[in-house]
């Protein structure tokens, strides 16, 4: 019996309570809809330690519920580690600040911004909804970016 290696995708934002867990849940949802769940391992992390161990922000939870996207009840914020750069095939940042933070690890070249996969969004960065409370806008951007990312991976990995 042969086993096909999983494609490992990590989403990264600042605190791992708003954007990256939203992207993790949305991407997982799209992967499941495509019948590819067994081919992927999907996670998220933060570049800052402010929220380690916390559940995703209530705004993230609410917008995901509104769009019928399941969020794992076990999801807790965690900090990005050096090992993540070796463990994951695709490291997807929400904004340029996240990329700069990852560059301090010396691995920024492996990471890309989510909205690179959604050129129709006409934005480079997914805004942080933590203070602005613009979770609906952020959901739309994350959904577009995740759909584009999945299309990119399917092409690159011949899925």
Image (cartoon, grey):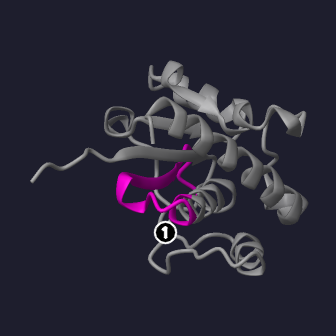
Q: Is residue 52 left or right of residue 97?
A: left
Image point 68% across, 55% down: which residue? 19
Query: Which residue is nearer to you in this view: 83 or 140?
Result: 140
Query: Which residue is nearer to you in this view: 100 or 4?
Result: 4
Image point 55% across, 43% down: which residue? 47
Query: Which residue is nearer to you in this view: 35 or 141?
Result: 35
Image quadrant in which you'd find residue 70: bottom right
Residue 93 visible at all:
no
In percent of width and height, residue 28 lies at 53, 61
Residue 157 visible at all:
yes
The crowding category of the residue bearing disc 1, from other C-alpha atoms within 10 Å (few below 14, some 14 to 19, many at least 20), is some
Q: Which residues are magenta?
A: 31-50
Q: Residue furthest left?
A: 1
Q: Secondary structure at mark 1?
A: loop
Compared to 25, does 49 lie above or below? Answer: above
Image quadrant in which you'd find residue 1: bottom left
Locate the C terminus and report the quarter of the image it occupies: top left
Query: Which residue is nearer to you in this view: 46 or 75?
Result: 75
In percent of width and height, residue 68 lies at 69, 79
Image point 37% across, 52% down: which residue? 39
Residue where numbered disc 1 is placed: 76
Total numbered badges shown on the rendered structure: 1
In percent of width and height, residue 136 lies at 86, 65
Q: Is residue 5 left or right of residue 155?
A: left
In percent of width and height, residue 142 lies at 73, 52
Image quadrant in which you'd find residue 117: top right
Question: Does the magenta run of residues contain 46?
Answer: yes
Q: Is residue 85 left or right of residue 152?
A: left
Question: Does the magenta run of residues contain 124?
Answer: no
């Amino acid at each position: 019996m042969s086993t096909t290696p999983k494609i490992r995708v990590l989403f990264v934002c600042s605190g791992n309570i708003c954007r990256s867990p939203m992207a993790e849940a949305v991407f997982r949802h799209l992967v499941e809809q495509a019948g590819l769940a067994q081919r992927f391992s999907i996670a998220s992390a933060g570049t800052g330690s402010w929220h380690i161990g916390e559940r995703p922000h209530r705004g993230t939870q609410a917008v995901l519920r509104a769009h019928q996207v399941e969020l794992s009840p076990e999801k807790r914020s965690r900090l990005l580690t050096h090992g993540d750069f070796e463990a994951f095939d695709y490291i997807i940042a929400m904004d340029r600040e996240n990329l700069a933070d990852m560059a301090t690890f010396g691995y920024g070249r492996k990471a890309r911004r989510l909205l690179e996969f959604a050129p129709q969004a006409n934005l480079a960065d997914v805004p942080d909804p933590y203070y602005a409370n613009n979770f609906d806008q952020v959901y739309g951007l994350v959904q577009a970016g995740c759909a584009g990312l999945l299309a990119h991976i399917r092409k690159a990995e011949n899925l």
